[in-house]
Structures are given as C-alpha cells and as structure tokens.
C-alpha cells in the first residue's frame, strides 16, 4: 500500500528596518533575550494579520544585514535558515514553534550568518523563515501573504522601542517583506540609476539562471560564465579609438570599473578582468557565444 508522506512548505520573509539617520559603526547583532522578544512580536504580528498562521513555525535570525549580504548567489543566509528548520520541524510530527538564531560572543557558529558588510546604511534586513505543512489551504495562504505582506505588515510601533534601545539608533520605519520584495527593491534601485543590464547579470548569478553577457551603459562588457564575472576591457592604448574622448574619459571608465568590482565584492561574487587589444571586437555587436569564443581562443 502506497502512502503519501507529508511535506513542509516555506516562505522566505524578513523585517526591513529603515533608519531615520545613518548610524556609523552600528552593530545590528541582537542578544538572545532581545532577539527572542523581537521574534515573538514578529510572529504575533503575523498571526494577527493572518489568523490561519496559528499552526506555523518560524525561524528568525537575530541580526540585521545590508541588502548586499542578503542578495548573494543562491541566498546563503536563507539556505542556512532552511537547513536549521529541517532540524526543528518534521513533516511527520509538525509542531509550531519559534526558533531564534543568535550570535555568541559576537559571532554565529554558521559563517553565512556573520556580517561582512560594514559601511553605514539606512536599510537593514532581519531575515526570517515561515514553515507550514504543505496543503492546498496553506499554499493559498502563502500566496496571499506574498501578495499583501509588504503593504499590510507594518511593525514600526510594535518594534521601535526594543530596536532603538538595543541598537542605539533612530527607527524611521519597519515592515515585513518577502524575499521577492527585497529582490524587486534591489532591482528597482539598479534600474533607477541606469544599471538595468547590470541587474540582468546579477539576476543570472543570484538566481542561478546560467551564463549571460551584457553591455552596460558605461560601455563596460560584462560576462557571467557560471563561475565568475569577467570584465572585458580595452587596453589603454586603444581606448580612444573605441570610445573617443580624452584621458579623463579613460580615467572615469576605470573608476566606474572599480565601483562595479566593489559592488560585486559586497555581494560575494567572484570576478576577473580580461584586457583585449582587439579594436574590432569592441566595435562589433557581441553575443554570449562570440564573447566566450573570443576568450577561449585567447586562452589557448
């Protein structure tokens, strides 16, 4: 006799903290007591908004991260939260509970949870994971949450006092969002500063969508080959033949390249630089296949 084994379903979400002013040196690790209080308040707010969630489990990380550390290849923070959930929630004997992950001595035992972006930022993400038994009713509920939580899940007044006290900061706004909301927010940021082609590259990397080749508005050629980003740049002595301009234009081109590399570093993405002397390569329209062929031929 065949029996269908029960399964679990997950929803990646978070509490997004927006500061009213930058706080240099802000440490966003919460101690165990404060983190557990925050996770209880977040869960209670969720259940108030969506009463059917009374039988759900939650995994919460007691630390706030910059968007760049969340938006990384295959989402390592959320991957590790899912692994933690597998230890605490079993399909055959599901029991709702709140699991709060905190650092000890200023460090998490799982490296993915340790912060590695330090520059001041007005926005921080406190990651969380919702776990439910997989049923048609819960699937409909999760779909509803995904479509409404960013508008409905305002928790500023619920969390302001404990966050301002714990982190010595000024809270402007706090609301719950899904990981999809965070991705859309990040994409919009890049598109608004005319970096839509770069978002196409980032999207392929983060969501493991395969190789891609893009030309940025700045003229930079960017290849993602599935392992690293390759910046294909002209040698200095042929730059003006391709792009025109003066020495200052080349300097600006190199400065922009440096900023692009710093952005990838913030997202934990590997990169290299391929310098070419081939003027015609840069003057012709290239494709993913032609760029790969050119790099392969030079490597031989």
Image (cartoon, helix red, strand yellow):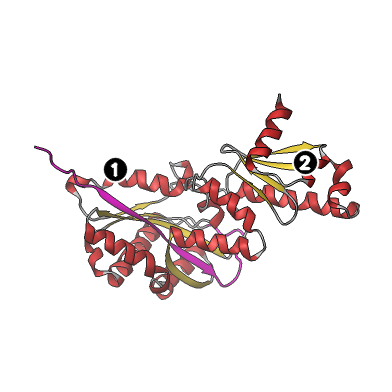
Taking 206 as reference, is 110 left or right?
Answer: left
The residue at 24%/53% (across/down) is 134
Residue that badge 1 annotates = 87
x, y percentage for residue 91? 21, 46
Q: Is residue 55 above or below residue 286?
A: below
Name the outermost residue toward the front. Answer: 284
Asked if residue 17 lies in the magenta stretch, the reply is yes
**Cβ–Cβ under 8 Å for marks 2 and 1:** no
Checking the image for residue 108, the label placed there is none
Whole-percent x and y of residue 51?
24, 69
Residue farthest toward the bottom in the current orientation of the protein: 157
Does 124 sit left or right of 60 as displayed? right
In the image, residue 153 lies at what x, y percent? 39, 71
> In the image, what residue occupies the spot 75% across and 52% down?
219
Q: Quadrant of the N terminus?
A: top left
Quarter of the image where one finds residue 223: top right
Residue in the image at 79% along x and 46% along y: 283
Q: Quadrant of the C terminus?
A: top right
Q: Which mark is residue 281?
A: 2
Instruction: Tell me if I can see residue 41 in this picture.
Output: no
From where the camera sits, is residue 1 visible?
yes
| Residue 140 part of the magenta segment | no
Q: Nearer the viewer, mark 2 or mark 1?
A: 2
The span shown in magenta is: 1-27
């Amino acid at each position: 006799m065949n029996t269908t084994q029960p399964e679990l379903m997950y929803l990646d979400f978070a509490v997004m903290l927006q500061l009213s002013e930058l706080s240099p040196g802000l440490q966003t690790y919460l101690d165990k007591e404060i983190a557990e209080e925050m996770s209880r308040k977040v869960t209670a707010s969720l259940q108030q908004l969506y009463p059917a969630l009374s039988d759900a489990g939650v995994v919460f990380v007691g630390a706030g991260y910059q968007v760049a550390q969340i938006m990384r290849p295959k989402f390592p923070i959320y991957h590790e939260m899912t692994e933690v959930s597998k230890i605490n929630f079993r399909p055959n004997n599901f029991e709702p509970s709140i699991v709060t992950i905190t650092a000890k001595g200023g460090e998490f035992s799982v490296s993915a949870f340790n912060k590695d972006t330090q520059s001041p930022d007005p926005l921080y993400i406190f990651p969380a994971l919702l776990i439910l038994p997989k049923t048609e009713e819960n699937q409909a509920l999760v779909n509803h949450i995904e479509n409404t939580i960013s508008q409905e899940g305002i928790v500023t007044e619920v969390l302001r006092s404990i966050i301002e006290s714990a982190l010595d900061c000024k809270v402007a706004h706090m609301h719950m969002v899904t990981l999809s909301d965070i991705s859309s927010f990040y994409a919009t940021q890049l598109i608004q500063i005319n970096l839509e082609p770069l978002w196409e590259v980032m999207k392929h990397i983060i969501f493991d969508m395969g190789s891609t080749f893009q030309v940025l508005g700045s003229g930079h050629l960017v290849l993602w080959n599935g392992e690293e980003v390759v910046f294909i740049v002209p040698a200095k002595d042929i730059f003006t033949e391709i792009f025109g301009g003066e020495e200052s234009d080349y300097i600006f081109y190199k400065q922009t390249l440096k900023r692009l590399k710093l952005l990838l570093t913030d997202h934990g993405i590997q990169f290299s630089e391929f310098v070419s002397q081939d003027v015609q390569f840069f003057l012709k329209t290239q494709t993913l296949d032609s760029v790969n062929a050119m790099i392969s031929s030079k490597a031989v």
